[in-house]
Every structure is written in C-alpha cells, then in structure tokens.
Amino acid sequence: MDKLLYIAMSGAKQNMQALSINANNLANAKTTGFKADLAQARSMQAFGEGLPSRVFSMTERASQNFDSGSILHTGRSLDVAIEGEGFFAVQADDGQEAYTRGGHFRLTETGALETNDGELVIGENGPIIIPLPVNNIQISRDGTIMVQPEGAPSSVQEEVGRIKLVNPDTRLVDKGNDGLFRAKNGGQLIADVNVNVLGGALESSNVNPINEMTDMIALQRQFEMQLKMMKTAEEIDSSASSLLRAF
C-alpha cells in the first residue's frame, strides 16, 4: 500500500510540473523569437532514513527546441530577424550579458537601442546608443546600424554601431526564468561574424500549438489516472482496516 500511494503521489506531482512547462509554451506561442521548452522525466533515488529503497520520477526542463521559427516580414526598420543560427547579445536586468532571438527593437528617449522587454542591445563596445534625432535607420546583414542624421540628404549615412551577434553551441547555454539565454560558465560569448540578420522582419515563436494542446490533454489524463490510483489505495486501506476490526 505504501509503495502504491508513493508512486501515484510522485507521479501526480511531476505531471503538474510537466503541465506548467507545457502551459508556458502555449502562453508564448506568439512571442517573438521564443524557443519551446522540452520536458523530460527520469527516475531519481530517494535518500533518507533507512535503506534507499524508493525511486521517484522527476520532470525537468532539460533543454529547448532550437529550431528556427518562421520569418514574418514587417517592413519596420527596427525589426530584425536572425537567419539560421545565432543570438542577439543584450544586457539583462542584472547587468550581465545575455542572449535572445527576439529582434523587436525600439529606441528610448535617450537613443538607447533596447528590446521590446527593455533589455539594452549590446554592440561591439557595450550598449548601443544612437545619436538623436535621425530621419532613417537601417540595419545591414552583419548587424551594422546606419543612420541618416536629421536634416542631412538621403545620400548621407553614418555608422553608429554594430549589434553583437553570437553563435554558441546550444549545449553550452542555459535559459533563465526571464527567457534569456546565458553561457553556462557565466562568461561572455565571442561575437561571430558569420551570423546574418534580416532587417524589416521578425522570427516567430517555434511553438506548435497543436502539439502542445495534444501533450496537455495527455498529461491531464495521466494526472487523473494518478489520482484514481491514490483513491484506490485509500479504499484498499479502508477495507483492510475494516477486516482487522472485524477480528
């Protein structure tokens, strides 16, 4: 009885963990550059007083699906999508360098280039600051930012910075709770000149809503099965107690 209840309880708990990962993917199905999280279950030895005779299941966010999302052409000069593999370098809220695929950029009142979530975009020499006012902004394939100063003829283009683009081995980066990727060793990644971007476009999320909904239904049914097992364990325990009282 103890083993039946323990297995059902641990299974239900991990089903809830998998559901939270699944729900987060669905919630970000429209988030620019989002990479779907992958849930993985594995057995873990339970240690405590006495012999380690129990094994429980543990669901974890093992990695992400790094497949590219579809390219959406917006025509907006500050929308940028990475073609193929790679990441934009940004400054996270903790001041450390982090990486993202979301290229929906904007300018602050001071001319700082930032993501839609407020992280500063990093260039070759730190955060990119564009001298305002400007009439036109263009971002080339290598991440170079060209501007037309206000009042200058259209033929005048000035380079004001270059977005830092990196292309690490995905096994060497980890995704944080803020949705940004960081190097597992805590350091900064080296810029890769072979990463190309496409201006006037955004990369959509790579979440497949149909697959996520199917997985959610399967997880909910597994959770219900675990609850039925716990109910059955309770009924068996009650029956055994009734038999003992009868004697």
Image (spheres, rainbow, N blue to C red):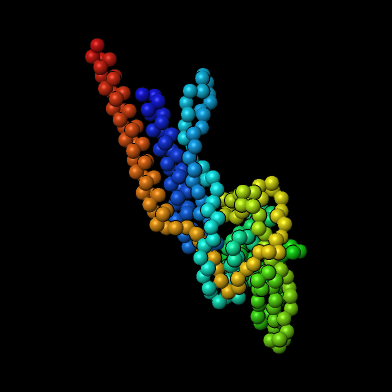
Q: Position of residue 106 (x, y in %)?
A: 61, 70
Q: Position of residue 192 (x, y in %)?
A: 70, 61
Given the current orientation, which residue lies at the most extreme bottom position?
153
Taking the image as shown, residue 198 lies to the left or right of residue 51, namely right
> Which of the image's four quarters has the C terminus?
top left
Q: Position of residue 26 (x, y in %)?
A: 44, 56
| Residue lying at 54% horizontally and 51% vertically, measured from the top left | 64
Q: Who is closer to the viewer here, 88 or 111?
A: 88
Given the current orientation, which residue lies at the most extreme top position?
247
Q: Is residue 24 visible?
A: yes
| Residue lying at 54% horizontally and 65% vertically, measured from the top left | 203
Given the current orientation, which residue lies at the most extreme left position?
246
Can you tell which quarter of the image residue 140 is in?
bottom right
Can you tell which quarter of the image residue 245 is in?
top left
Taking the image as shown, residue 165 lies to the left or right of residue 39, namely right
Q: Who is closer to the viewer here, 196 or 46?
A: 196
Given the current orientation, which residue lies at the most extreme right position?
125
| Residue lying at 34% horizontally and 40% vertically, measured from the top left | 224
Q: Is residue 122 visible?
A: no
Residue 129 vertical position relative to residue 23 in the rendered view, above or below: below
Taking the image as shown, residue 76 lies to the left or right of residue 217, namely right
Q: How many marks?
A: 0
| Residue lying at 47% horizontally and 32% vertically, measured from the top left | 56
Residue 172 vertical position relative to residue 152 in the rendered view, above or below: above
> Which of the image's four quarters has the N terminus?
top left
Q: Position of residue 46 (x, y in %)?
A: 51, 28
Residue 16 vertical position relative to residue 189 in the rendered view, above or below: above
